[in-house]
Every structure is written in C-alpha cells, then in structure tokens.
Image (cartoon, rainbow, N blue to C red):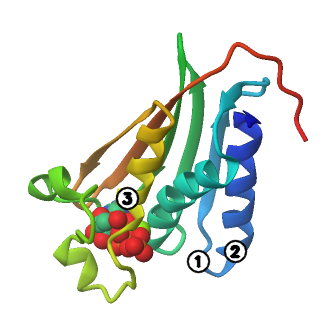
Amino acid sequence: ATIHAPQLINQVVDRFEMSTKNQAIDFKRKIVDEPIAIKGDRDKLMQLMDNIVSNAVKYSPEGGSITVSLKQEKDRIVVSVKDEGVGIPKENIPNVFDRFYRVDKARSRNLGGTGLGLAIAKEIALAHGGNIWVSSEWGKGTTFSFSLPYAEEVVIPE
Ligand code: ATP
Ligand code: MG
C-alpha cells in the first residue's frame, strides 16, 4: 500500500506518549509536515517503528527525553529515534541486530525481552529496500535510525 510516512510515524509516537505517562518520558518531534509517500506493508512498518521506540522507552530513565525525527533526503526518508538512556557499549554495537542478542548490562536491570525486536526491525527495513543503523555511547544515550525509499506519488492522509 502507499503510506503517508509522517502520519505513520506520528501515530506510533502518539501511542507511546499515551502509554508511558507513568514514566514521564518527554517526547520531542522533528517530523516534516508535508505528505511523503512510501510503499509497503503498513503493519510491518508500524512494527519496525514500534520496536525502535519501545527500546528507547525501555532503556530510558524516568523523565528521559526521546527525540523522534523524520527527514527527507534525495531519494529516501530517514527516521531517527534518539534517547538519553543507558547507551550501548562500543563492543556490543555490532551485535545488537542479531537474533536473541541482549547486552548483559541492560539485561541485569531486569528488563524483560527476548532480544528479537531489533532483528525483526532490521528484517522489515531491508525487505522495504531501506536500511537501519545505530550510534550509541555507553551511559549517554542511543540513536537508532532507519531509511526507506520514497515513492513519487501523491498521498492523502487517512
Ligand atoms: P525484545 O525487543 O525482543 O522484547 P530486547 O529489547 O532485549 O527484547 P532488542 O530490541 O532486539 O531486544 O534489542 C537488543 C538489545 O540491544 C537489548 O537487549 C539492549 O541490550 C540493547 N538495546 C536496544 N535498544 C537500546 C537502547 N535504545 N538503549 C540501550 N540499549 C538498547
Ligand atoms: Mg526490544
């Protein structure tokens, strides 16, 4: 289907904003305010975004801020989710997209999960002709980004 990218991203952020009130996460948005069409499976793209944002929430302290940005490049969009959470040690970064991989120090914080979220996110991004990557600093925070090609099409928000 043809999907309005900023709308889809905003919908996911809206949902997390409502469901994390007790953790007082401060969501900031830098999302372009114009129609951008992307092609793909709406449910899968929602899941991709969901898996990234749920991690940002899970690995953030109470009151932490999460910045979601969507920018348009020459032939793709780039969505970034930046948190001020625990971060990922440099030596673990190459493995975070592996199935069932979890960073020990984060796991010891007793946070639930199976270690599949990022493997699924990567699978979905690649299946849509996009990419996914991370930059992180242990103790400072993490930014996950993914790109998706956009379609030269008119899209009307639903
Ligand atoms: P699941 O998503 O299956 O519930 P999970 O969140 O542990 O479990 P992934 O989403 O695949 O698994 O993430 C893999 C590991 O990468 C996590 O266990 C965590 O150690 C680390 N990680 C992922 N996102 C972040 C983040 N935003 N900040 C810090 N560490 C992260
Ligand atoms: Mg996860």
Q: Mark 2–mark 1 contact, CB under 8 Å?
A: no
Quadrant containing ligand 2 = bottom left
For the residues labelled 1 and 3, the Cα–Cα distance comes to 22 Å
For the residues labelled 3 and 2, the Cα–Cα distance comes to 21 Å
**SS for callout 2:** helix
Asked whether, in this view, residue 38 is left or right of residue 52, the answer is: right
Vertically, is 20 above or below 7? below
Q: The N terminus is located in which quarter?
A: top right
Query: Does the beta carbon at disc 3 come under 8 Å from ligand 1?
Result: yes
Residue 120 percent across, percent down from the top left: 42, 58
Residue 38 lies in quadrant: top right
The answer to whether residue 148 shows anywhere in this view is yes
Residue furthest to the left in view is 91
The amino acid on which the numbered mark 1 sits, given as a three-letter code, is Gln
The answer to whether residue 85 shows anywhere in this view is no
Residue nearer the viewer, 149 or 77? 149
In the image, which is nearer the foreground, mark 2 or mark 1? Answer: 2
Circle 3 residue: 118
* Residue found 61% across the figure and 60% down from its top: 26
Residue 151 lies in quadrant: top right
Circle 2 residue: 19
**SS for callout 1:** helix
Asked whether, in this view, residue 16 is left or right of residue 91, the answer is: right
Residue 104 percent across, percent down from the top left: 17, 76
Circle 1 residue: 23
